[in-house]
Image (tube, rainbow, N blue to C red):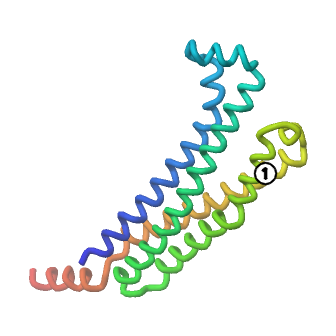
């Protein structure tokens, strides 16, 4: 069975998805500006009727809400990936503790993000989307602090994933190493 390859694939999907989510987050921050600065004709009419400021707040809120929901779904997917990866690593690495510990660390980090940081970030973010929260220094400071914690945890998780990927690529299983030793002795 190729559980080591499956483990590597799952880890690659996890890390690739995390990088893609970071890209989507950054792009969502500028989505409102893109729509409002060069709107199509029908959107331009709506902006004129509602006013630029009200429309900008609404579009920013929709963009932020979309990224909140996608982030929540991705966090759940990461938890499922962590369990699948942990099972594969358990079967693939002769039950070595290091890869399992890294996978466990990644699971703990994503669980912390999902259950501790994200709910408060979503709650405070919704407060910040519209006045008076969008003008309150306390709420804005809290949201930025939560974002820093979230992205700090994300960086640590990506580093642990990179370390795990390096381990999977560099260290070979004992059976494969034995086959190579026997092949060298026969030559």
Q: Residue shown at 55%/16% (left/top)? A: 40
Above or below residue 156? Residue 63 is above
> Residue 81, how many percent across, how many down?
46, 67
> Residue 17, how many percent across, how many down?
47, 54
Frontmost residue, 129 versus 23: 129
Q: Residue shown at 71%/14% (left/top)? A: 48
Q: Quadrant of residue 167 in the image?
A: bottom left
Crowding around mark 1 (Cα neighbors within 10 Å: few <14, some 14 to 19, many 20+) is: some
Q: Quarter holding the N terminus? A: bottom left
Above or below residue 27? Residue 72 is below
Q: Which residue is mark 1?
A: 124
Frontmost residue, 119 versus 49: 49
Q: Residue shown at 67%/31% (left/top)? A: 59
Above or below residue 172? Residue 139 is above
Above or below residue 180? Residue 47 is above
> Residue 110, how many percent across, how many down?
59, 66
Q: Quadrant of residue 158 in the image?
A: bottom right
Frontmost residue, 112 versus 45: 45
Left or right side of 7 for 180:
left
Q: Quadrant of residue 129 in the image?
A: top right
Left or right side of 70 for 185:
left
Which residue is most to the left? 187
């Amino acid at each position: 069975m190729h559980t080591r390859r499956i483990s590597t694939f799952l880890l690659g999907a996890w890390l690739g998805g995390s990088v893609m989510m970071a890209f989507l987050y950054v792009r969502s921050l500028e989505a409102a500006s893109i729509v409002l600065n060069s709107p199509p004709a029908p959107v331009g009419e709506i902006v004129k009727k509602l006013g630029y400021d009200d429309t900008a707040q609404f579009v920013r809120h929709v963009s932020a809400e979309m990224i909140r929901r996608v982030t929540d779904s991705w966090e759940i997917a990461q938890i499922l990936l962590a369990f699948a990866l942990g099972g594969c690593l358990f079967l693939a690495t002769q039950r070595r503790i290091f890869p399992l510990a890294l996978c466990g660390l990644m699971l703990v980090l994503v669980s912390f993000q999902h259950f501790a940081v994200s709910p408060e970030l979503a709650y405070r973010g919704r407060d910040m989307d519209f006045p008076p929260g969008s003008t309150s220094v306390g709420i804005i400071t809290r949201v930025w602090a939560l974002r820093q914690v979230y992205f700090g945890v994300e960086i640590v998780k990506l580093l642990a994933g990179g370390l795990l990927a390096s381990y999977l690529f560099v260290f070979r299983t004992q059976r494969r190493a034995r086959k190579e030793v026997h092949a060298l002795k026969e030559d």
